[in-house]
Amino acid sequence: MSESKKVFSDAKSALDGLLSDGMTILAGGFGLCGIPEHMIVAIRESGVQNLTVASNNCGIDDFGLGLLLQTKQIKKMISSYVGENKLFEEQFLNGDLELEFNPQGTLAERCRAGGAGIPAFYTKTGVGTVIADGKETRDFDGEIYLMERALTGDLAIVTAWKGDKAGNLVFRKTARNFNAPMATAGKVCIVEVEQLMEVGEIEPDQIHLPGIYVDRIFEGQNFEKRIERRTIRET
Amino acid sequence: MAWTRDQMCERAALELEDGFYVNLGIGMPTLVANYIPESMTVTFQSENGMLGMGPFPLDNEVDADLINAGKQTITELPESVYFDSATSFAMIRGGHIDLSILGALQVAQNGDLANWMIPGKMVKGMGGAMDLVAGVRRVIVLMDHNAKDGSPKLLKECDLPLTGAGVVDTVITDLGLFEIKGGQLYLSELAPNTSLDEIRDRTEAEFVQ
């Protein structure tokens, strides 16, 4: 059992030796829900530059991936929906930031395929739109499909609720989102968890993502878990 | 006044059937959930990874790990289930969702839909809209019949970038209900106090009655 080799004390030590300028990072989360907030701060502090980041969104001005926009560490985003932050718009319109839009399901499937050893797949999503420009299409049974390439990253940074020292993960509610498929598609995957457990403490049948995909794991202290649109009912 | 926004949502709710799995777009389509008869079971999907979306939480129930695709806080129901984004879009792309109700900037008479970008303005992205219109069995558009400047939104051809080609099945506006079959637009229902002449006046698309 190599469990102890995976466990690190914090984000900085877990990222040690893995960051380099120009690398591609897959970052889990949807909006601000289930984002690897500790690792984003540690990446900011590392000063690494020219990052390509695949993430469904790009945080807000002062939280999540928005923190890496402030320091201009991101060269390119691969996302389905952005612009919840002014910095993004400003840097994009200035030409300081490249942007590749992927339909949300295509982004998720590109990661899933990347982690599953499938180099490309065909989908109806985006046929007849600008997303199809320059991409191969093919007729299957009388319907046109678009070929999309798999996506992998040098590093995947994801968040889970519970994880054991062997890297087996349990997610919580809608914080699972892109964390599971992206964890499989990084050459190296680091996970920050709210609760680090001993091996055996999680029922094997209840594990959402097997530890085989996880290279490093640490327990994050004091998750902020900011809410983007707090919406309540009165009664 | 023809149909109010509430009446449009109420009309859209009549298209739901018992046992349906439904995905509602952000904005007006969300309100359709308020008009489902108590006797009917409809399960709402949220493409960020949930089936069985519950109502907004009470102040003391708010949970940062539980949001909908519009990033609003929500609640779970006894029948709720969570999954990852790849699984969520597999059920969308795989045709397992019965119905999606979405807003639109423009719809063409052949079912082309434009609802994600206006060139020259900051583009925020398509989110899951392209996947939904490509994969969900039936797509209903709920929109004002005309834009704020009075220009028609039901067109011969969309001039905005498309979200999907030939993907819309039904369009509900304040003036009536249209269906698109075999690349042809049909006017199926007229809203109260609306005349055929008024619809013709305010529509660019060619339609059959």
Image (cartoon, rainbow, N blue to C red):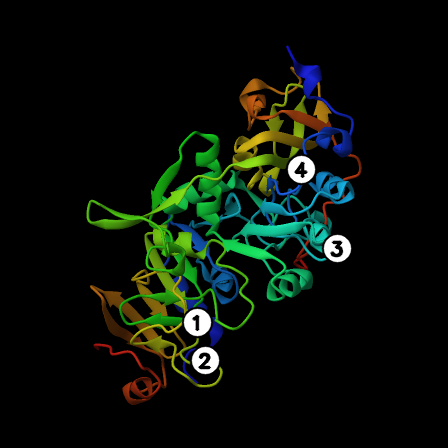
What's under tag 4, amino acid-wise? Ser
Q: Where is residue B86 in the image (x, y as percent from the top left)?
A: 47, 40
Res A203 quadrant in image: top right
User: Is residue B39 among the parts visible in the rendering?
Assistant: no
Which sits earlier in the primary sequence, circle 2 or circle 1? 1
* Residue at the far top in the pictured view: A1
User: Is residue B138 among the parts visible in the rendering?
Assistant: yes
Find residue B147 and name its label. Answer: 2
Q: Where is residue B26 in the image (x, y as percent from the top left)?
A: 52, 61
Find numbered disc 3 in the image and state the secondary structure of the residue it sits on.
loop
Do the residues at discs 2 and 1 belong to one chain? yes
Q: Name the residue under label 3.
A: A62
Do the residues at discs 4 and 3 belong to one chain? yes
Q: Are marks 2 and 1 in contact (CB under 8 Å)?
A: yes
What's under tag 2, amino acid-wise? Ala
Q: Which of marks 2 and 3 is in front?
A: 3
**Residue sitting nearer the eye, A60 or A138:** A138
Find residue A20 and name its label. Answer: 4
**Residue sitting nearer the eye, A55 or A167:** A55
CA separation, marks 4 and 1?
A: 43 Å
In which quadrant is the N terminus of chain B drawn?
bottom left
- A134 displayed left or right of B126: left
Q: Nearer the viewer, mark 4 or mark 3?
A: 4
CA separation, marks 3 and 1?
A: 31 Å
Q: How crowded is mark 3: few (under 14 residues within 10 Å), some or many (20 or more)?
A: few
Q: Residue at x 20, y 45 (%)?
A: A141
Q: Mark 1 points at which residue?
A: B105
Q: Which of marks 4 and 1 is in front?
A: 4
Does residue A47 lie above or below B174 as drawn? above
What's under tag 3, amino acid-wise? Asp
